[in-house]
Image: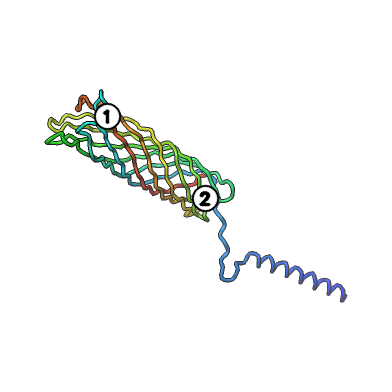
Amino acid sequence: MTNKLIKFTVAAAAFAVASLSAQAADMPVKGRPKPPETLNWAGCYLGGDFGYAWARDFDAERGSVTGVLSGFSPTDSANANGFKLGGYLGCNWQVAGPFAIGAEGDLEWTNARGTTTFPNSGPPDDFYETRIDSQSSVRGRIGYALDNMLVYVTGGAAFAHVTEHDVLAATGAFNNNAATRTGWTLGAGFDYAATARWLVRIEYRYADFGTLRYVSTVFPGFAENHRITENVVRLGLAYKFW
């Protein structure tokens, strides 16, 4: 009977020690909280964004035959600034621990507008207005996860619908030249997981839409060469649906 009691006591003590050891492994070190688990960023999401753009359109006016810079060529850019509103869709794949790669596309409406004059053409001076009405992009992303935050860089192809509104001030005659420009964009930002599904975003991107060239009907004999670039800050909110 005594031997059975001893065996039972030893077994109970061993079980108690094992249970306490398991609990101790799950407890944080005194004065130091247990590290949070890193969120799995793999999956796809759909979101909306709002932002502000600072675009610059600098026109170099040249003789349409000679290619020589005109004496009327603008000395200042048209600062086509305005708001943006749109949506984005993308997917992430978690690779190599905290690193993630992804692909994303977006489509936005914008009211970016800006005007500048042609010097030596007046008085009154002729002018042009740059209008950017819509934009989109298709990009890759590389990110690094920091707990509930994914810090990333992004870059790819960018597209913008641009209209150049040229005005001959003396008569009020005007000419509109519209085109969809293809360029590139590069930027960085971070996504913050407010929950496992809802992602808050802050992002900055630069875009270069190259040079839009045309001969305006109101400025005969001259070719306009508009170089268009843009800086944008965006705020976004997305839902991770898969």
For disc 2, the neighbor class at 10 Å (few under 14, some 14 to 19, many from 20) is some
Nearest the eye: 170 or 107: 170
Residue at mark 2: 144
> Would you identify the image quadrant in which residue 75 lies?
top left
Q: CA distance from mark 1 to mark 2?
A: 43 Å
For disc 1, the neighbor class at 10 Å (few under 14, some 14 to 19, many from 20) is some
Element under label 1?
strand
Residue at mark 1: 177
Quadrant placement of the N terminus: bottom right
Left or right of 208: which side holds 130? Answer: left
Q: Residue at x 57, y 57 (%)?
A: 37
Left or right of 229: which side holds 186? Answer: right
Q: Residue at x 32, y 40 (%)?
A: 110
Percent of width and height locating residue 20: 69, 69
Q: Is residue 65 above or below residue 60?
A: above
Left or right of 89: which side holds 114? Answer: left
Percent of width and height locating residue 81: 28, 43
> Would you identify the image quadrant in which residue 107 lies?
top left
Label of residue 112 in the image: none
Q: Specify the amino acid type for callout 2.
A: Tyr
- Upstream in sequence: badge 1 or badge 2: 2
Q: Which residue ends up furthest to the top in the rendered image?
A: 65
Q: Is residue 2 above or below residue 124?
A: below
Element under label 2?
strand
> Would you identify the image quadrant in which residue 31 lies?
bottom right
Q: Specify the amino acid type for callout 1.
A: Asn
Percent of width and height locating residue 48: 40, 45
Percent of width and height locating residue 143: 50, 48
